[in-house]
Amino acid sequence: MDVLWSPWRYDYIKSDKNEDAIESTGCVFCDILKSSASDEEKFILHRAEHNFIILNIYPYISGHIMVVPYKHIADIDKSSKQESDELMDLTKKCQSIIRSTYYPQGLNIGMNLGKAAGAGVAEHLHMHILPRWVGDANFMTAIGETRTIPESLQTTYEKLKDAF
């Protein structure tokens, strides 16, 4: 699927890939946590004891965020009660913040566990929370295989950061 407008990708394309290099673990979330970049540069909105909240850098729609455990696990049943309780508490907080920031008509909240379920990062579980409006997945996505994202990631980050 194409993205109609993604200005944040230019910084990645023009960047020196060896600059501030980290040893890759093969997991995007673990690599983000190991990176020396600031939370703002990594689009981390909040850090809790067992999980962190981050923008999805390939969003389905503006305001698409994720709650991600620090622990590298693929299945929620591998998390401790404290880890999964905090994940759900943060998910509830995200729901409230998205509602009060974007005023959506609905929300999608969920996980895809395993490649067959549609997980883009199957080896490290994460909860998606994203605002939805009637008609937001119109013909552009369904027919044109193109998403329209009305704001940059930096704008989304700035809108949400203070709420956390």
Image (cartoon, rainbow, N blue to C red):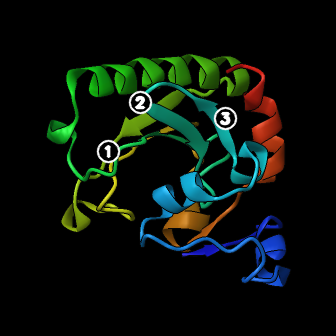
Q: CA distance from mark 1 to mark 2?
A: 17 Å
Quarter of the image with the C terminus in it: top right
Identify the amino acid type marked 1: Met
Q: Amino acid at mark 3?
A: Leu
Whole-percent x and y of residue 50?
A: 41, 30
Q: Nearer the viewer, residue 70 or 1?
A: 70
Which residue is label 1 attached to? 111
In the rendered image, residue 103, in percent from the top left (x then y), is placed at 67, 23
> For mark 3, what is the residue?
45
Q: Quadrant of residue 98?
A: top right
* Cα–Cα gap, marks 2 and 3: 14 Å
Q: Is residue 84 left or right of residue 55?
A: left
Q: Which residue is mark 2?
A: 50
Of the pair 129 and 80, the residue shown nearer to us: 80
In this rendering, would 127 be left or right of 47? left
Count neighbours of disc 3 (C-alpha within 10 A) and say few if under 14, some if 14 to 19, many if 20 or more: many
Q: Nearer the viewer, residue 122 or 133?
A: 122
Q: Are marks 1 and 2 in contact (CB under 8 Å)?
A: no
Separation of residues labelled 1 and 3 (CA atoms): 19 Å
In this rendering, which labeled residue sits more in front, label 2 or label 3? Answer: 2
Dot in front, 1 or 2? 2
Locate residue 7: give its quadrant: bottom right
- Label 2 residue SS: loop
Give the residue drawn at x 61%, y 66%.
140
Assign the N terminus to one quadrant of the image: bottom right
Q: Earlier in the sequence, mark 1 or mark 2?
A: 2
Q: Residues within 10 Å of mark 2 (few under 14, many from 20)?
A: some
Measured along the vertical axis of the image, is residue 130 above or below residue 14?
A: above
Q: Give the x, y percent position of residue 111.
A: 32, 45
Q: Position of residue 58 (x, y in %)?
A: 60, 61
- Given this view, does label 1 or label 3 mark the residue nearer the observer? 3
Name the residue at 81% across, 53% down.
152
